[in-house]
């Protein structure tokens, strides 16, 4: 985590620091999280820009238990109960042109801007 201070002497977090806090909190509350802005292959190769411009930084989903598919096989049936797209921003920052366009083209998706844990508090205790 970077330790830069703003003009008032307060800790200034990077977007990456905020993103990691959000991911950790969501996962601790049972959410699965995918970083849509990075795709890894193997242990060292990271391909950035492999997704369409403007797509939110994170996709989080929570599974809903539906029961057993077969008593003999003891399979459980799960389905995503809720999917949320999160665009991570530092306080005071807003969406850029590509992001505004992406959000306008996908009005049916549940999405939000997340600048801190308070912006996702309802997801943590859902």
Image (tube, rainbow, N blue to C red):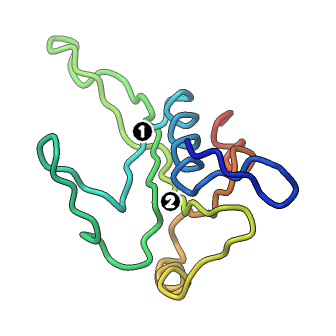
Percent coordinates x, y for residue 22 in the rendering:
57, 43
Report the residue at 50% width, 48% height from top: 82
In-front residue for pair 65/99: 99
Q: Is residue 75 left or right of residue 89?
A: left
State the separation of the CA atoms marked 1 and 2. 12 Å
Q: Between residue 66 and residue 101, name the one nearer to us.
A: 101
Circle 1 sits in a helix, a strand or a loop, which is it? Answer: strand
Residue lying furthest right in this view?
A: 8
Identify the mark at residue 85; answer none if there is no mark: 2
Quadrant occupied by the C terminus? top right
Q: Residue furthest left?
A: 42
In the image: residue 4, left or right of residue 106 = right
Marks 2 and 1: in contact by CB < 8 Å? no
Lower sequence index among marks 1 and 2? 1
Q: Please state if 43 lies on the left or on the right of 98 as rendered.
A: left
Residue under numbered circle 1: 32
The answer to whether residue 114 is above or below residue 21 is below
User: How many C-alpha atoms fall within 10 Å of the one at disc 2: few (<14), some, or many (≥20)?
Assistant: many
In percent of the image, x 64 and y 44: which residue is there? 3
In the image, residue 75 lies at what x, y percent? 22, 20
Mark 1 packing: few (<14 Cα in 10 Å), some, or many (20+)? some
Determine the image quadrant of residue 29. Answer: top right
Quadrant (top left/top right/bottom left/bottom right) for the N terminus: top right
> Image height check: is 106 above or below 117?
below
Foreground of the two, 102 or 49 = 49
Whole-percent x and y of residue 104?
54, 85
Residue 56, label in figure: none
Q: Residue at x 60, y 77 (%)?
A: 95
- Against 99, residue 87 (above or below) is above
Secondary structure found at label 2: strand
Position in image of residue 88 (x %, y %): 57, 60
């Amino acid at each position: 985590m970077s330790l830069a201070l703003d003009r008032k002497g307060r800790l200034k977090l990077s977007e990456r620091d905020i993103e990691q806090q959000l991911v950790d909190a969501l996962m601790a509350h049972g959410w699965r999280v995918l970083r849509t802005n990075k795709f890894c292959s193997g242990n060292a190769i990271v391909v950035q820009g492999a997704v369409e411009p403007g797509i939110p930084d994170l996709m989080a989903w929570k599974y809903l238990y539906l029961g057993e598919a077969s008593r003999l096989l003891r399979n459980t049936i799960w389905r995503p109960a809720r999917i949320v797209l999160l665009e991570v921003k530092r306080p005071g920052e807003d969406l850029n042109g590509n992001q505004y366009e992406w959000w306008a083209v996908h009005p049916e998706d549940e999405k939000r801007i997340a600048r801190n844990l308070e912006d996702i508090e309802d997801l943590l205790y859902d």
